[in-house]
Amino acid sequence: MQDLTVVINGGGMVGAASALAFAKAGACVKLFESNPPSLDNQGNNWDLRISSVNAANWQWLLSLGIHGVIDPGKVKDYQRLTVTTQSGQSLTFDASEVGLTSLGVMVENNALQSSLWQCLRDYDNVDFVTEQRIDSLDSQQKTVRLTNNELIPFDLLLGCDGANSIIAKLSSIGYRGWDYDQRCLLANVELEQPIEPETWEVFRPQGPYALLPLSDTKACLIDYDERASIRALQHDESALQKHLYSVFEPRVGKFRVIKAASFPLQRKHALNYTFNGCIALLGDSAHSIHPMAGQGVNLGFADIQCLLNELSDKPVAQALNVYEKQRKFENAKMMRLMDALQISWRSTHPLARFIADVSLTAAKAPLLKNFLIKQAIGD
């Protein structure tokens, strides 16, 4: 890839990981990001933006060079994952069942982004553009025009600029999707009692609630509910504390809320992942998925690895064609699965609840369970 010039718009986790992977492969990389991260990201308290990264993707990120760079206090591995239906049936996935020490890690988004940027600083073939933005593009001439009118040529342009991607807009790529009419409430808490390295999720009609372990005594509590219900809580600190206690105290005991916030839940899927044989969308620019299974950023990292793999032995246009077919299919499959779980496991209809319980019972069969664990770790 030494002769390849790659322009990347967006330097978040997926954009920065893309830049690092392409730089490591020898490409000439230009990374556009108007809000670069602070490279001094130390601190005891976690930010609310946290990702669950599966074991396979975490090993890939370590191979890019973040080991020894990322703040170890903002990474927490977990060994078990438990899901519980409305009727109380539970299924636990344990890393030891497939000979592993962890299923993946919880990582603070800011810490991961910062570590990727620190690694990028070591590459002479990476240019950072933080003062100018992409204003227009010409896919025929393979150039982008910046806000200062400068023209930048490229062989490959990657849109890693999120759900409101400017690259998608400039490429006239549309989306299909909808609003779930739900919000996700996040609360980082300090617990009185230590917890196990386990993440869990409990389903109920208004939406699931879950816990992400951040340390022995810190966790991120997650509650999905109707939009109006969550918004009402955000304006009343006492009501928020009372609500969180009513949901989580029976499982985790007493805790202190450090910070809390919420965000709306939407589903978006790009109608096309590529344009004119030289432009590609990755990560949230291509797909926004319900976060209940923590697959969002994992799909983005899988996008990068697929694209790099195809570019290793194919010209750009052909590689993009294969990338679009493979990743659009895989991402759509995961999105449909999340929607199916959302509907069936939240439903109060007796048949839907019966199907949810039967599916969970079937998943306990050793062969199927091992298969599901391997899917969960990205194997």
Image (spheres, rainbow, N blue to C red):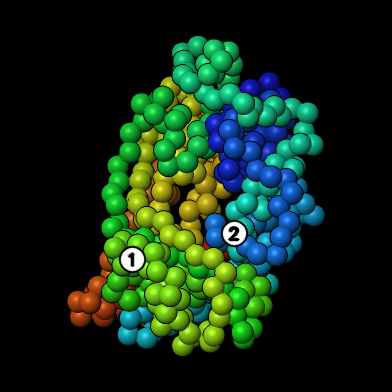
Q: Is residue 126 at all visible to an observer of this figure?
A: yes
Give left or right: position of 230 versus 22.
left
Q: Quadrant of the C terminus?
A: bottom right
Q: Quadrant of the N terminus?
A: top right
Determine the secondary structure under disc 1.
helix
Quarter of the figure with residue 171: top left
**Would you name the residue on which mark 2 appears?**
47
Quarter of the figure with residue 276: top left
Residue at 44% across, 30% down: 166
Q: Nearer the viewer, residue 347 or 336?
A: 347
Q: Is residue 340 at all visible to an observer of this figure?
A: no
In the rendered image, the vertical position of residue 368 relative to residue 66, given as above or below: below
Q: Residues within 10 Å of mark 2 (few under 14, many from 20)?
A: some
Quarter of the figure with residue 32: top right
Give left or right: position of 252 versus 27.
left
Image location (x, y in percent) of residue 329: 40, 46
Give left or right: position of 134 versus 227.
right
Give left or right: position of 63 versus 323.
right
Q: Which amino acid is tagged 1?
A: Ala
